[in-house]
Image (cartoon, grey):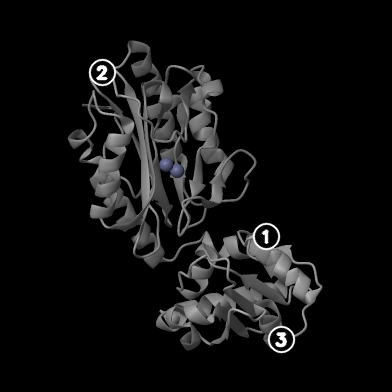
Amino acid sequence: MSKLHQDRIANVASRLVRTNNDVIFVTPGADLRYLTGYDALPLERLTCLAIRSNGDAWMIVPTLEKPSALAHHVPDMGIELLDWQETQDPYSILLKSVGSITQPLVNNLMWVEKAFGLQGASQVNVELAGKLLSDIREVKTEHEIACLHEAGAAIDAVHDKMHLWLRPGRTEREVGKDIAEAILAAGHVTVDFVIVASGPNGASPHHELSDRVIESGDPVVVDIGGTMASGYCSDCTRMYVCGSAPAEYLEYYAVLFAAQEAARLHARPGVTCESVDAAARDILVSAGLGDQFIHRTGHGIGMETHEEPYIVTGNKSLLVPGHAFSIEPGFYFAGKYGARIEDIVTCNQDGILSANNTSRELVIL
Ligand code: ZN
Ligand code: ZN
């Protein structure tokens, strides 16, 4: 894969020329993994990639991480590998190799401690990379799209087995533990989140597992995801009810189902991100559920669960082939219940393909 990563680094360098920045610094996280394939530990010790606009690149790692960097073939992709020992100053070692800098960028999720370290050692203010990196990462290659569909199939396999775990009398935490094991068994290497939000807890979109006992008639929001060995993430929400849900809930759910479907039918290359949000939102608003739809319709997904492009009012960016994002409208009634239907979809030349393909109907258990 080193040719792939060399190309990505060269792409960053050419964009630095366009933005008049001379260097970008990138610390461990999805940006570093995307650019180099190296999933370095985010430690208090400095690991940092530096790419100059002329294409030269360095990576400094703590000496004890050097075997790991070598195992990830860092020097094979044209990156000069530097290391620093416990009592040395890594910032000055890195900057000595990189040379003088005037307009440096740092990746958005760099720890402030590291950004200040770079500023202190260089005496130059750093700026956020912003769209320089996200513009590259948000347009996926065919291989990346395949990885996202593989992740989608893996999380679908977990939703398919929900009847084994979700039933009245069990706590959300007990159900969540079973789901987490199944996420790993389905091929993910990490469990990133497990939301089991029963009854009134469903009104909190990011509810954390609790000891609430699931009752008969509870609608249950199950939103789950993990990361595959490829580095790509899954994220899918399905709705379950143990027994029979309240009649008005079924009416609201039918509206939500139509809203989610409308957004999927609307999404295609050439339409704006905000128009996909509107396609779902308009239906919920018309049915009087606008105030209950308290979040955007979706987010991009790749090596991070949430990344560009965001499917939100105000985002006038056009969808293009290679985009991957969620479509996940919901409604939330405080103290009563909530609902969300979520698919990851990928954009191709003709339209979109869904990475999640289990039934979107309310599943009666
Ligand atoms: Zn999501
Ligand atoms: Zn989700």
Q: In terms of secondary structure, where does tag 3 sit?
A: helix
Residue under label 2, please give it.
Answer: 216
Could you tell which of marks 2 and 1 lies nearer the N-terminus?
A: 1
**Residue projecting furthest to the left:** 164
Q: Is residue 263 above or below residue 201?
A: below
The Cα atoms of the two marked residues, 2 and 1, are separated by 48 Å
Q: Compare residues 316 and 357 and report the one nearer the observer.
A: 357
Earlier residue among tags 3 and 2: 3
Instruction: Determine whether label 3 and label 2 are within 8 Å by CB.
Output: no
Above or below, comparing residue 54 to residue 167 in the picture: below
> What residue do we see at 46% from left, 17% from top?
335
Q: Amino acid at mark 2?
A: Ser
54 relative position to 82: left or right: right
Could you tell me how far apart the alpha carbons at marks 3 and 2 are, in whole angstroms?
Answer: 66 Å
Which amino acid, by three-letter code, is at mark 1?
Answer: Val
Where, quadrant-wise, is the C terminus in this rendering?
A: top left
Residue at (44%, 30%) from the top-left corner? 259
Circle 1 residue: 112
Q: Which mark is residue 285?
A: none
N-terminal label among 1 and 3: 3
Ligand 1, by image quadrant, is: top left
